[in-house]
Amino acid sequence: MKAVVVMAQCPKTHGLYGIRAQNERDGSWLMTWAFKLNSKTATSEGYDRSEISGIVNMSVDYPGCPYCGTIGWVQCGRCGILSCYEDGPNDDSVQFRCPRCGISSGVEVAESFDLSSVSF
Ligand SMILES: [Zn+2]
Ligand SMILES: [Zn+2]
C-alpha cells in the first residue's frame, strides 16, 4: 500500500502540519492521520514533494487539524497548499484567505484535487 504525507497549514495558528494519505485499491486517496510539522522536517522528509491527485476521502477516524481540530480542508488555487476549512453555508464558492501566500479568493469545494504543485 502506498502512503504519502501532504503538507497543510492552519490559517488560525499558521502552524504547518502533515496529512497522511494512503492510496486505496480504487485509486482514490484516504486521509488517515494529521500531525504537527515544521518546514525543516517537511523538507528533509520530502513531504513538500508529495504528489497526490484524484478523489480524496477522509477516514472516519481522521483527527482533523492538530492545531484547531478542523476536519475539512481546501486547497489554495495559487500555491497549492492545503488549509483547514470548516464547511460553510451551501455556497458554491466561499471566501478563503490562504495562510501561506495570503491571497483571498473564492475556493471551490470539490472532492478532487491535484496536489502535485505544492512546493516549499
Ligand atoms: Zn487548523
Ligand atoms: Zn496559497
Image (cartoon, rainbow, N blue to C red):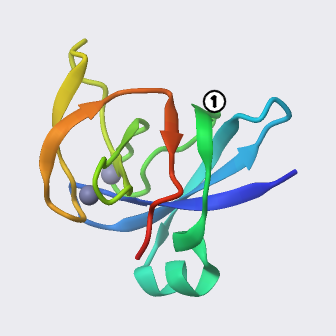
Give the residue displayed 32% in from the left and 67% down from the top. 15
Residue 10 falls in which quadrant of the image?
Answer: bottom left
Front one among 33 and 48:
48
| Rendered position, 86 above or below 105 | above
| Rendered position, 75 above or below 14 | above
How far from the left and from the top, in percent, is residue 55?
A: 61, 31
| Rendered position, 33 above or below 113 | below
Q: Is residue 83 left or right of residue 36?
A: left
Q: Quadrant of the C terminus?
A: bottom left
Front one among 8 and 28:
28
Badge 1: residue crowd in 10 Å (few <14, some 14–19, many ≥20): few
Residue 93 falls in which quadrant of the image?
Answer: top left
Q: Is residue 25 left or right of residue 54?
A: right
Kind of residue sitting beneath label 1: Val
**Ligand 1 within 8 Å of the CB at mark 1:** no
Numbered circles on residues, count: 1
How far from the left and from the top, in percent, is residue 22?
A: 73, 47
Give the residue displayed 51% in from the left and 52% down from the top. 115
Give the residue displayed 65% in from the left and 45% down from the top. 32
How far from the left and from the top, in percent, is residue 16?
A: 38, 68
As helix, strand or loop, the secondary structure at mark 1 comes to loop
Give the residue displayed 79% in from the left and 37% down from the top. 24
Residue receiving disc 1? 60
Front one among 64 and 1:
1
How far from the left and from the top, in percent, is residue 72?
A: 40, 35
Query: In the displayed image of the protein, which residue is found farthest to the top?
Result: 90
